Amino acid sequence: MSNFLTISDYEPDEIQNILDLSSELQTAAEPVLAGKNIAFVFEKPSLRTKVGTEAAINHLGGNVIHIDADILLSSGKAIPFTSRESLKDAMKNVSLWCDAVFARVYSHQTLKNMAGYSSIPIINALCDKHHPMQALADLHTLQQQFGKDKKLTLAFVGDANNVAFSLTELLLKFGHTVNFSGPEQYSWTDDKLSYFALLAVQYGGEFNTVTEPSKAVENSDAIYTDTFISMGEEHLYEEKIKHFEPYQVNEELFSKAGEHTGFMHCLPAHRGVEVTDAVIDHPNSWVYKQAENRMIVSKGVFATLLDGEGKATKKPSVPHLDKESVNGT
Ligand code: CP
Ligand code: NVA
């Protein structure tokens, strides 16, 4: 059964098919998910991913069933009488009633365990390492701005986190250039750098780590940042935050880029921390377009995974996404 856990195993044409289908389904009220039940389980808070995706599923005629994370996933603790049941039993049951599970979890391993026990697709709604649904929306946003053919340069300024990882691998697969600038102690590990270098060679893009954020944003078509402290890292706030001050995307940094350069952020933003009001509210800020595209690309993903008769009988044109690969997933 096909899952959507990471960007890693998708080829560019397969991703483009999803994005093109998303455009087709953007306004069409086609009930391609009629009769499908999609379980949502969220270990962490969410606005865009939860509401945007549920709205997309509703537009396509599907149903969402929310399952309390304590009911479905507490079994990961495997301590008798402190959790209800094993993850295996829980996932095998959900597979009997539902057509897919959309899950936001702390650990990527939880998604892999869920996929191992289920006979329906598992879709990653964000984990510690990846945010593939966000990356699809971001590429869709860039294609809306620049078309599909132009080779772009995106400067990612800030934390080497889940959002940065999925976005970087996706852009490299499309032959774009990514300039990364962030504090050395929170930058990419060597295995990730090797993976990015490999993707750059394979698909004709470029990945650069740039010490000075002002250099990273020069000649960029878009500047992207995300929170410096991700969900689950709150205890690291004091330790981390002091290293990130030079990486705030403010008017001064934004002015080093071109007139056409856009600002991107997956949201939620911490105004005054990683980005200033002047930048996020700038006419070149695309943050609300990105948020709108979260709903739109969800249509393409769920329609691809669940189209057909019965339970996800029509395989998407993408290979399995849950296998171990060079990116350490
Ligand atoms: N960008 C994003 O995933 O937002 P939420 O955390 O609100 O879902
Ligand atoms: N990096 C952030 C993204 C939130 C959408 C986090 O994981 O909290």
Image (cartoon, rainbow, N blue to C red):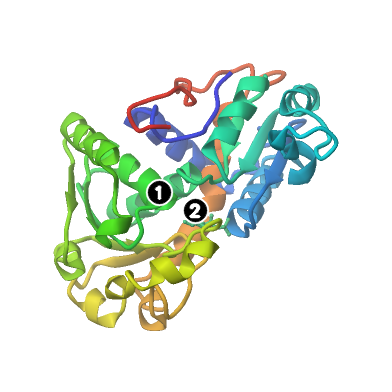
Question: Is the residue at mark 1 in contact range of ligand 1, meaning its CB lies under 8 Å from it?
Answer: no
Residue at screen point 22% across, 36% down: 194
What mark, if any, has residue 140 been given in the picture?
1
Judge from the rendering whether residue 80 lies leftward or rightward of residue 23; answer left or right. Answer: right
Q: Quadrant of the N terminus?
A: top right
Judge from the rendering whether residue 95 lies leftward or rightward of residue 84; answer left or right. Answer: left
Mark 2 or 1 closer to N-term?
Answer: 1
Residue at screen point 80% across, 24% down: 93
Question: Is there a contact, CB below 8 Å, between mark 2 and mark 1?
Answer: yes
Residue at screen point 43% across, 38% down: 20
Identify the amino acid type marked 1: His
What mark, if any, has residue 54 been given in the picture?
none
* Residue 302, visible in the rendered structure: no
Q: Nearer the viewer, residue 91 or 140?
A: 91
| Residue 307 rendering spot, x and y as whole percentages | 62, 25
Kind of element beneath mark 1? helix
| Residue 196 rendering spot, x and y as whole percentages | 25, 39
User: Label 2: which residue?
Assistant: 293
| Residue 214 rendering spot, x and y as whole percentages | 17, 70
